[in-house]
Amino acid sequence: DSGVTQTPKHLITATGQRVTLRCSPRSGDLSVYWYQQSLDQGLQFLIQYYNGEERAKGNILERFSAQQFPDLHSELNLSSLELGDSALYFCASSEAGTPISSGNTIYFGEGSWLTVV
Amino acid sequence: AQRVTQPEKLLSVFKGAPVELKCNYSYSGSPELFWYVQYSRQRLQLLLRHISRESIKGFTADLNKGETSFHLKKPFAQEEDSAMYYCALNAVSTGFQKLVFGTGTRLLVSP
């Protein structure tokens, strides 16, 4: 168990709808990252938050947004859903804003399976 | 631009055979590279980081800056090694760091 918790595990929704995916980082971790894993695109970095502030943006669509709350949990909001948004969405966390240097490690949650029908 | 390339989508070998999962990168700075493993759509787990120069579960990977490669190797594959393997690059952009992943290689080890 990595300590990163994601809910829901599975979600099926219709096109045009909006969903919210939730992530609780490991205790003490200030950084949260969101990744999208789909069959055709592989693992894509979406966005990173550090201590409540946006730190880095990747290939995140304008229909998607995220935030990190004062208790450090994060939510990824997906709106106007399309069939192509069906994917496994991973949250990850690390202690610092720099995920890899000085021994910092990025830990992944089990992911939230989103199916858009 | 930062890019990680894993040319093989699937690598199928027999148990006991050597394995080499290829990874090439494109990065203008000093690279930090990693291998992550994902078993049956579970969470990604860190397998190796090049700065540690370690061997985990019999796997090793050497950073070759001349060839911009970080291939993952194991001399004798085991069935439990069957999984998705992702090569990742720590990329720095405008002061921020993020992991850039390759598209992954599925390793299938048959008995």
Image: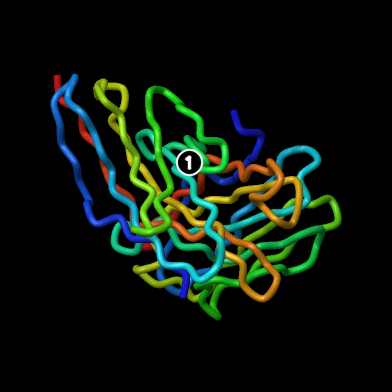
* For residue A51, side relative to residue B11 (left or right): right
Q: Is residue A38 visible?
A: no
Q: Quadrant of the C terminus of chain B?
A: top left
Residue B63 vertical position relative to residue B97 in the rendered view, above or below:
above
Residue at 18% across / 21% down in the picture?
B15
Q: Provide residue A115's location: percent of width, then percent of height.
A: 39, 56
Q: Nearer the viewer, residue B50 or A29?
A: B50
Say which amino acid is labelled 1.
Answer: Leu
Q: How many numbered markers are drawn?
A: 1
Asked which quadrant contains residue A81, the reply is: bottom left
Residue at 53% across / 58% down in the picture?
B31
Task: Please name the residue that numbered disc 1 is placed on.
Answer: B44
Label 1 chain ID: B
Residue at 47% across / 51% down in the picture?
A11
Q: Residues within 10 Å of mark 1 (few under 14, many from 20)?
A: many
Residue B36 vertical position relative to residue A41 in the rendered view, above or below:
above
User: Looking at this rendering, what residue extends furthest in the right direction?
Assistant: A70
Q: Provide residue A13's location: percent of width, then percent of height.
A: 44, 60
